[in-house]
Image (cartoon, rainbow, N blue to C red):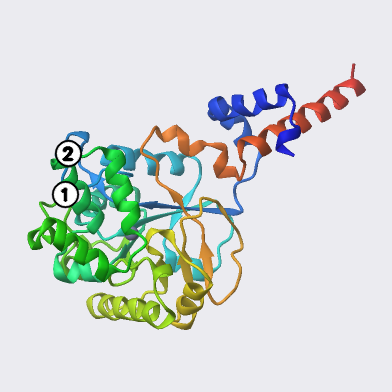
Amino acid sequence: MKSLRTKVDRFGVSFIERFGGFLNPLLLELKKENNQLLSFYFHGLFESSQQKELHHIDPQNNMTLKQFDDFIDYFQNHNYKFIAPEDLNSGLENGPYAMITFDDGYFNNMLAVDILNKYKVPAAIFISTRNISENKSYWWDIIYKYRAQQGVSIEKIRDEQKYLKSFKHSAIDDYILKNFGKEAFIPWSDIDRPFNTEEIKNPASTSYISIGNHTHNHAILVNYNKEEIKEELRLSNKIITELTNSNPISIAFPNGNYNQLVLEAAEEEGFQYAFTTEPDRNLLPLGNNKLTRVNRYLSKTTKIKKYGGFYRLGYTPNTLYDEAIMTASSLKKKLKIFP
Ligand SMILES: [Zn+2]
């Protein structure tokens, strides 16, 4: 269908791509959002933009505190109620709802606590337990830190990270060891370090944070067989349960990768919610499968207004354009009745 579009249509679509943000106030008036849950995933937080310049962590997708604060403020002002994964079981009605999740388990997530308390908003942190119990730096940060120091271009760094994602954790560890030495696993500062076990026990004595499973070794699960997948999930849940006295019912797949085998393994291990990285809204009510997949949007490090994007209403530039044309022609018809 796309190839059949006329020049005018293509212009319309690209116009919406560029300027669609301006249409939002209008769209939001017309569209009901209350039957949806928007789930977002974050990674690290920077105290300030200057902290980014230290290159202690791969800055990709990491937000500043100010951006995080704006994010919550924006959605609360648009009548979104923030919920935790645990709330999914209580049957959601009368949304719209939003959810904040952090992947990996960076200590810098603690920077969010004051803001969560201020807005009375919960967040879930999906942790990779081996990094936490061994105070082990995340491998993609190691690649970033050392390569950036060597003056390697960001494109080459991304290629190297991407290449490593096709391996099991043991092969990635061997690669790090061989290329950067044992000390590379030691974090550089509070900016790149994972939480420690004491901190996971009681994250800043706030009830607004809950802990979920992100495997033991940050294992990209599609690289493993079923028994290995289960072992990753079990080990992580065992440690989290020991530390927090509660057994996680949610898993976020590392790097967002999963297949049928991964879903089966997660379901058989008793998980109820699998958080993906498919950028889409979740229509309510959620399905009542044993294991429910929850779509998540990647948090944006650009202007907060982008969150108001048409994507949050389930549109793409193409479908939004089609609807605009249809609305315009039906309006025209109506106007003819009252000339
Ligand atoms: Zn991760």
Position of 229 with respect to 60 (left or right) is right
Query: Label 2 amino acid?
Result: Gln
Residue drawn at x 26%, y 47% is 45
Picture coordinates of residue 316, whole percent (x, y)? 61, 40
Is label 2 in a helix, a strand or a loop?
Answer: helix
Q: Residue furthest front?
A: 178
Q: Are marks 2 and 1 in contact (CB under 8 Å)?
A: yes
Residue drawn at x 37%, y 53% is 121
Quadrant for the C terminus, please. Answer: top right
Quarter of the image where one finds residue 175: bottom left
Q: Is residue 183 above or below residue 330?
A: below
Q: Residues within 10 Å of mark 2 (few under 14, many from 20)?
A: some
Which of the marked residues, 2 or 1, is nearer the chain's N terminus? 2
Query: Label 1 amino acid?
Result: Ile
Residue drawn at x 40%, y 45% is 299
Q: Nearer the viewer, residue 78 or 149?
A: 149
Q: Is residue 261 above or below residue 19?
A: below
Q: Is mark 2 within 8 Å of ligand 1?
A: no
Picture coordinates of residue 129, whole percent (x, y)? 25, 70
Quadrant for the N terminus, please. Answer: top right
Q: Residue furthest top?
A: 339
| Residue beneath disc 1 | 191
- As measured in the structure, the alpha-carbon distance from the residue carrying label 2 to the one carrying label 1 is 8 Å
- Image quadrant of ligand 1 equals bottom left
Position of 263 with respect to 162 (left or right) is right
Quarter of the image where one finds residue 179: bottom left
Position of 245 with respect to 121 (left or right) is left
| Residue beneath disc 2 | 51
Picture coordinates of residue 50, whole percent (x, y)? 17, 34
Position of 94 with respect to 125 (left or right) is right
- Please give the label number shown on residue 98: none
